């Protein structure tokens, strides 16, 4: 395994437990400029893996009788357009509340939600939105009377002596995020990326992300959760029950056959953590470099025994734009929500969906474009938007 990870230039940490046997691998650097090696003490930005922790803390408050799944969020927030949204809707991404991580976000999340309009009626669709989990973190603070970090330490970290699990990583152990400059073909610090250099305005938001930990401590968290150490086994089973709106997602956990856990990505970093509900096998992967998502997924599949090689490149090869290339305009997908996206031309084409950040759209083949840092593509010739293999027709509307 170490040789494979080395041969494909993996930079990060992997924890793998099978039949009680633990293997851990640490490769590369926390900071490429200082070349501080990644070790078992390295704290990685867990990004959306943090949602599992937020969900568990929410259920802990429910078990204490301080909170109910049916509680409407109007109990804590002035949200005229979301009067019937409940805690359960937030946990399961069925609230219809839009994404706060947008180009023009300059206010607090509470103010954003006060002014936001629903994407759909609650429970009508499953629509992943980080805003749901930021609001859950705020509810945890309001109900407990303590900060999110204090609750994380009190309810999650201290009971298992997870000394590296925190929203406040130690500078000497923090794995710094690095973005890949596809035009210069080299890594840069995340805040130096020409397209994604505005991440600082989201730094003080948590609940949806923001937790740092070692890969071993993430594995300990998952194991303790499944064993009923954080909440009762009855509550744990409820948390892992998918909703009618989405078979693959429950209350803060992604469900993939018998594996449960979460994936996460942020500027210059990504992570995945899953535990098998029957065998109790665990896989945790974290990297502090932007990579082609299929590359990361194939590493996970290899570790899980789903495939026997890693063939995807670490970085996809992009082509140069010509002056004749022009795919700018506004488009609409043929999906349930008639989702719209806009393409503009800057140094590269940029694609933006409603309530989302703009992302570079790189040409990788004639009339075939890749949405950076995703497994999504735009097939211009056939007018198809392809997301993780699922093809959706689109049409130009403006």
Image (tube, rainbow, N blue to C red):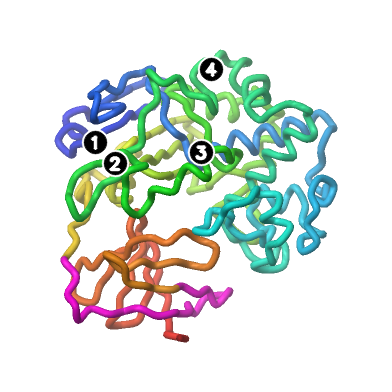
Determine if residue 260 is in view.
Answer: no
On the image, numbered disc 4 is attached to which residue? 162
Q: Which residues are magenta?
A: 320-341
Looking at the image, tell me whether mark 1 or mark 3 is earlier in sequence order.
Answer: 1
Disc 3 packing (10 Å; few <14; some 14–19; many ≥20): many
Kindly state the secondary structure of the residue where label 1 is placed: loop
Residue 239 in percent (x, y) is at 66, 41
Q: Which residue sits furthest front?
A: 106
Label 4 to label 2, Cα distance in Å? 26 Å
Is 64 inside the magenta-drawn segment? no
Viewer-proximal residue among 107 and 8: 107
Earlier residue among tags 4 and 3? 3
Residue 10's tag is 1
Task: Identify the element where label 3 is drawn.
Answer: helix
Q: Which residue is mark 2?
A: 299
Q: Give the spatial CA distance, label 2 vs label 1.
A: 9 Å
Q: Which residue is mark 3?
A: 49
Q: Earlier in the sequence, mark 4 or mark 1?
A: 1
Of circles 2 and 1, the one toward us is 1
> How far apart in space, not on screen, are marks 3 and 2 (Cα)?
18 Å
Residue at the spot 62% in from the left edge and 43% down from the top edge: 240
Instruction: Tell us which disc is closer to us: 4 or 2.
Output: 4
Q: Going by the image, does 93 lie left or right of 258?
A: right
**Is 321 covered by the magenta stretch?**
yes
Quadrant where the C terminus sits is bottom left
């Amino acid at each position: 395994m170490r040789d494979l990870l080395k041969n494909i230039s993996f930079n990060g940490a992997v924890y793998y437990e099978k039949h009680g046997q633990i293997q851990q691998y640490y490769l590369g650097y926390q900071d490429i400029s200082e070349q501080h090696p990644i070790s078992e003490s390295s704290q990685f930005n867990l990004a959306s893996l943090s949602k599992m922790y937020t969900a568990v803390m929410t259920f802990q408050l429910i078990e204490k009788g301080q909170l109910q799944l049916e509680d409407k969020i109007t109990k804590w927030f002035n949200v005229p357009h979301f009067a019937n949204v409940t805690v359960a809707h937030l946990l399961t991404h069925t609230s219809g509340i839009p994404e706060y991580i947008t180009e023009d976000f300059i206010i607090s999340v509470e103010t954003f939600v006060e002014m936001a309009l629903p994407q759909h009626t609650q429970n009508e669709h499953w629509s992943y939105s980080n805003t749901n989990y930021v609001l859950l973190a705020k509810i945890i603070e309001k109900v407990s009377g303590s900060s999110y970090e204090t609750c994380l330490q009190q309810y999650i970290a201290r009971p298992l002596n997870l000394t590296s699990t925190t929203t406040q990583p130690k500078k000497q152990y923090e794995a710094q995020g690095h973005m890949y400059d596809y035009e210069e073909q080299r890594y840069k610090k995340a805040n130096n990326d020409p397209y994604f250099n505005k991440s600082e305005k989201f730094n003080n938001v948590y609940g949806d992300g923001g937790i740092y930990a070692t890969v071993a401590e993430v594995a300990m968290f998952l194991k303790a959760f499944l064993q009923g150490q954080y909440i009762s086994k009855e509550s744990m089973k409820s948390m892992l029950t998918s909703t009618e709106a989405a078979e693959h997602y429950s209350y803060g956990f992604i469900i993939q056959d018998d594996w449960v856990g979460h994936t996460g990505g942020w500027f210059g970093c990504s992570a995945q953590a899953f535990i098998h509900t029957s065998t109790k096998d665990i896989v945790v992967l974290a990297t502090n470099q932007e990579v082609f998502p299929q590359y990361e997924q194939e590493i996970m599949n290899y570790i899980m025994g789903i495939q026997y090689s890693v063939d995807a490149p670490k970085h996809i090869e992009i082509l140069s734009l010509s002056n004749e290339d022009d795919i700018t305009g506004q488009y609409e997908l043929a999906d349930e929500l008639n989702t719209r996206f806009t393409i503009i031309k800057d140094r590269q084409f940029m694609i933006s969906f409603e309530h989302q950040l703009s992302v570079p759209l790189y040409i990788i083949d004639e009339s075939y474009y890749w949405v950076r840092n995703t497994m999504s593509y735009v097939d211009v010739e056939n007018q198809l938007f392809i997301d993780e293999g699922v093809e959706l027709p689109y049409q130009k509307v403006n």
